[in-house]
Every structure is written in structure tokens, then in C-alpha cells.
Amino acid sequence: MVTAKEILDRIETGGHRPTASRRRLLDAVVARGDGFTAEELVAEVKGLGRATVYRTVRLLLKEGLLCKLSLQDGAPRYTLSQKLGHHHHLVCVGCGVVQEFSQSVIEQMLMQLSGAGAIMGHRIEVYVLCPSCQAKSESTPGHSPRTGALA
Ligand SMILES: [Zn+2]
Ligand SMILES: [Zn+2]
Ligand SMILES: [Zn+2]
């Protein structure tokens, strides 16, 4: 697990000052870990302006410390990057937990598309129901939402 300290070190190495507001934001980011929106950070870190939050999120993205996920339900979500370098994401639609993976076979496959033009990048997000969410839905009797009265 990445710690706020490690992220601060990376920010400094990248030539950015670890200001007090960045530090507070990083604590919130590390506490959240998976799948938060910039607005959630704005709400959580009191006293930091929206512009500061968004600027810091952009900085962390640029340094490869955060990953941006475009999920089906609107606002982009961010997640702490565990792996440095190119990778993809598995996102649980039940609990929102994010896992990173890389598969050289995917990269090779995409290379073959280069006839369509110079590939400038790609993102792959795979939506899953993680094992613990699967277990939960199986152990709930009559888990079909249409069964029984409205809860
Ligand atoms: Zn990632
Ligand atoms: Zn899950
Ligand atoms: Zn890839």
C-alpha cells in the first residue's frame, strides 16, 4: 500500500513543494484509496479551495501517482496508483475496489492496430463483481431485486 509519505517524496522528486495543503489532501487521498471523485475530496478536506484540490489532483495524475477511471456513472473517479508504469484496472461494480493489472498480450494485440494510425495511448477498465461481493450476493436469500416487498 502506498503511504502519504511515499507520495510526498515522489512529489518532491518531481520538483514540487510538499506544501501543507498538499499534505492534507494526500492524507485524505490515502485514507480513501479507491475510487473517489475530486468533489468528494473537496467536501472532505475542509478549508481547501476547490481549485487547489483540482490542481493537486492534476499534479498527482501527471506524476503517475493517481489513476483516472472513467466509470459508467458519470464523474471521473481517481484511485491511488500501486504500480508505476503502464497498467489497466479491474473495478468492482459492487464495492468499488480497484485492482491494477498489466498483460503483455493486450499490448501486443494493440500494437497490431498501429496500421490505423499512431497509437497515442489507451485505457482499459474491466468491470467485475469481486469474489467477496459475489459471495455476498450468493448468501443473500432471494437476492433478486424483484422478490418480496419494497425494503
Ligand atoms: Zn492504476
Ligand atoms: Zn466488490
Ligand atoms: Zn495497456
Image (cartoon, rainbow, N blue to C red):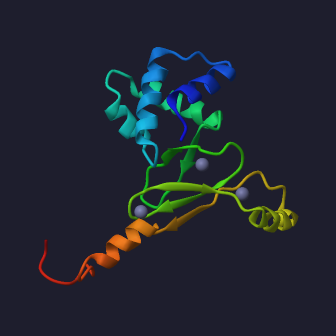
Count of residue discs: 0
Could you tell me which quadrant the C terminus lies in? bottom left
Residue 94 left/right relative to 11? left
Along the horizontal axis of the image, is 26 left or right of 137?
right
Give me the residue at 45% from left, 35% from top: 29
Residue at 71% x, 45% y is: 85
Return the residue found at the far right: 115
Pick whichever, 120 or 23, lies toward us. Answer: 23
Q: Is residue 2 above or below residue 21?
A: below
Left or right for 33, reference 151: right
Q: Quadrant of residue 113?
A: bottom right
Q: Where is residue 79 in the image (x, y as percent from the top left)?
A: 51, 45
The vertical placement of 67 against 44, above or below, is below
What residue appears at the point 47 percent right and 29 percent down from the top-left corner? Answer: 26
Instruction: State the residue in front, 130 or 18.
Output: 130
As displayed, is residue 88 above or below residue 149?
A: above
Q: Where is residue 4? Give x, y as percent.
A: 51, 29
Position above or below: 6 against 136: above
Q: Where is residue 30 in the image (x, y as percent from the top left)?
A: 46, 36
Residue at figure coordinates x 31%, y 25% from the top left: 46
Residue 90: where, in percent of width, then height?
55, 61
